Image: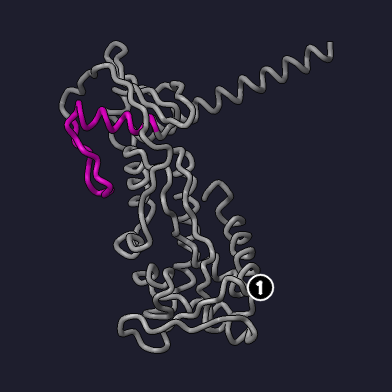
Amino acid sequence: MKRVVSLLVAVFSFVAAVCASGSTNVEQASALAGRLSARLAEKVEFVEVSAPAGKDVYTLSNNGNKVVIGGNNANSMAVGLNRYLKKYCNTTVSWYSSVDVELPQTLPAVETERHESRVPQRFFLNYCTYGYTMTFWGWAEWERLIDWMALNGINLPLNITGQEAVWQKVWMKMGMTAEETRNYFTGPSYLPWHRMANIDHWCGPLPQEWLDGQVELQKKILDRERALNMRPVLPAFAGHVPGRIKELFPNADINQLSPWQTFPKECLTYFLNSEDPLFAKIQKSFIEEQTALFGTDHI
């Protein structure tokens, strides 16, 4: 009897896990449609479909007055939704949250369609884009951009929001003060060029409130991206260190880089040789601190 009960419990647990997994994809796709338009959410229903190994798939069909969008995950369902919007509703979704989604008065039916992805990984963004208006975005702007990414099949987005707070923890563990770390960073608009080791300090220091706020924003961004079957690309250590680290570790192989553009001497950057033992120590510390804040499901 105990063996039978154990077997039933195992089967029930497996079925529950499968159902929960399936409903999550459908729920995320439905929520995305609802964020775009309540009318759209009423017209469209989502279902899970199988896909060949290494492929993503979406389908379109009709069920009475409903448009049925199938996908092997929420990301694929979102691409199918975008296909419906563009081909049948003649509308494009902007990544700007202030731009409403315009729909025809009568939402049309569809032809039966099935499409497979050409490539398994679809990357988006670069370091420089984080230096434009994104620097001053809040959750409303990010939420729309993430929806836009899902609609366009992005599943490998660069996500470097909040990394300065991680670096602050690392540099303080290495002996710097909180004030020294904030002064090492540039102002928000120049952070891409700081992150690429072009300049330090310019228009800094970063306010602690801004650092802390970016951590909370990053957590929301990552949660939503992962829910829509994206695997975020997070930063790692490439060798750029504060000049103060050279003072704290005088025997480390750290060199000052040449001037960039016409920025003053105090903005010059420092680079640690990757073969120096300190490099691995800093890299390990960064990965540990980043994982503690933002989880592990990323590249």
Q: Position of residue 215 (x, y in %)?
A: 50, 59
- Above or below 266: residue 140: above
User: In the image, is 185 to the left or to the right of 135?
Assistant: right
Residue at image coords 36%, 61% = 130
- Above or below 42: residue 206: below
Nearer to the camera, 48 or 155:
155
**In magenta segment, residue 170:** no
Q: Residue furthest front?
A: 275
Q: How is the image coloured?
A: one colour
Write down the residue under mark 1: 277
- Above or below 224: residue 46: above
Nearer to the camera, 73 or 261:
261
| Dot 1: element | helix
Q: Position of residue 189 (x, y in %)?
A: 34, 70
Q: Residue furthest right?
A: 1
Residue at image coords 36%, 22% = 45
Magenta-drawn segment: 76-103
User: In the image, is 204 to the left or to the right of 293?
Assistant: left
Q: Position of residue 176 (x, y in %)?
A: 60, 80
Residue 192: quarter of image: bottom left
> In the image, what residue type sits under mark 1?
Pro
Residue at image coords 36%, 88% = 264
Residue 129: quarter of image: bottom left
Q: Residue furthest bottom?
A: 265
Nearer to the camera, 297 or 30:
297
Q: Position of residue 143 (x, y in %)?
A: 37, 47
**In magenta segment, residue 101:** yes
Residue 82: quarter of image: top left
Is the N terminus in the top left, top right, bottom left or bottom right quadrant?
top right
- How crowded is the residue under tag 1: few (<14 C-alpha within 10 Å), some, or many (20+)? few
Residue at image coords 42%, 41% = 121
- Above or below 138: residue 244: below
